[in-house]
Image (spheres, grey):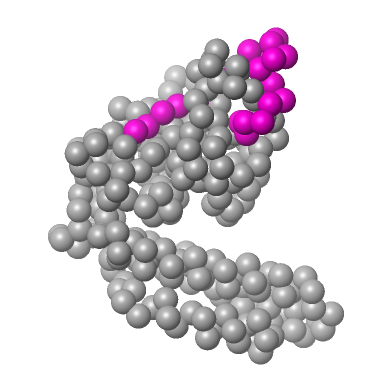
Amino acid sequence: MADSFLITPRNWFKGTLAPDLEGGLIHSVDSGGTPSTKEARYWDGNIPWLTPKEVTELDSQIYVSRTERTITAKGIRESGAKLMPPGTVMLTKRAPVGACVINAVPMATNQGFLNFRCGPRLRPLFLAYWLRINKLYLHLVANGSVYPELYKSDLFEFEISVPAIEQQDRILKAIRALEYAITLGAALEQTSSDPSRVTKFQEQSRRLSNIREELIPALLSGQLSVTAAPDTFPSMLEIESEGHL
């Protein structure tokens, strides 16, 4: 087992990214597949089919519900593609390595992914953020003769340490509130016709983005307590929405 990249409290539950029904962290890990492009009956169905390229174009967006191409149920049955339920953490294993999203609807992927279904001890959103802040670590273990690629055997050695579900929910609430504040600032910037206010919105968004980069690792490692943190965000968001930045 590889040591965790983050130093976490001793009372947090520790395990690996390998499937382990008894451990409760990871239920299953599957790759994807590509139906034959020569068979028209496999394509243009009602099943979204995700590629790594699309994930890189989503920027910081973490949930995905639409894809450029769709496939059919026949395409699923007669290829290596698998229909993944909503809430699956989809990690790109090559081109690029380490990009991560969560599907909001049933979805399939091509073979450039490792798709994690979480167990009862782990929220998918917690895992997604954890993978994102460990992206440098993922790059370090990626290997391949032609291009860098993550392999299950390497990933399954990773140790992840998580708090109780209730604490995960508090952590995620704080992170999502901050993400909302950043998104709201961008929206206010686009709708304002006052140059001085636009400048303030831009500065606030930059400041919040910098805070986010430091806050997320601190929250996911237990270095920062979130006992009361989520309740402090609504007032900040309310001030922002009124434009008093």
**Rendered position, 241 above or below 100:** below
For the point 54% across and 73% down, the residue is 208
For this view, does 143 lie left or right of residue 70?
Answer: left
| Residue 5 visible | no
Decide whether residue 24 is among the magenta residues.
no
The answer to whether one can see residue 103 in this image is yes
> Which residue sits at x=49%, y=25%?
82
Identified at 43% across, 53% down, the residue is: 125
Q: Is residue 208 left or right of residue 24?
A: right
228 left or right, relative to 96? left
Task: Give the camera-side residue of 37 and 166.
Answer: 166
Q: From the top left corner, tell me how far across and down residue 24 is, in percent.
A: 25, 44
Q: Nearer the viewer, residue 188 or 20?
A: 20
**In the figure, 18 relative to 233: above or below?**
above
Q: Which x, y percent locates residue 92?
A: 50, 36
The extreme left residue here reads 10
Number of numbered discs on residues: 0
Instruction: Choose top left, top right, bottom left or bottom right for residue 65.
Output: top right
| Range of residues picked out in magenta | 28-49
Which residue is the extreme one toward the bottom?
Answer: 244
Q: Is residue 170 above or below residue 109?
A: below
Residue 104 image point, x, y percent: 55, 46
- Residue at x 55% of width, y 26% of height: 110
Rendered position, 100 above or below 171: above
Quadrant where the N terminus lies?
top left
Residue 218 falls in image quadrant = bottom left
Q: Residue furthest right?
A: 193
| For residue 139, side relative to residue 206 (left or right) | left
Could you say where residue 87 lies in the image, as x and y percent from the top left? 46, 45
Classify the position of the C terminus by image quarter. bottom right
Between 214 and 119, the residue placed more toward the observer is: 119
Query: Residue 46's image quarter?
Result: top right
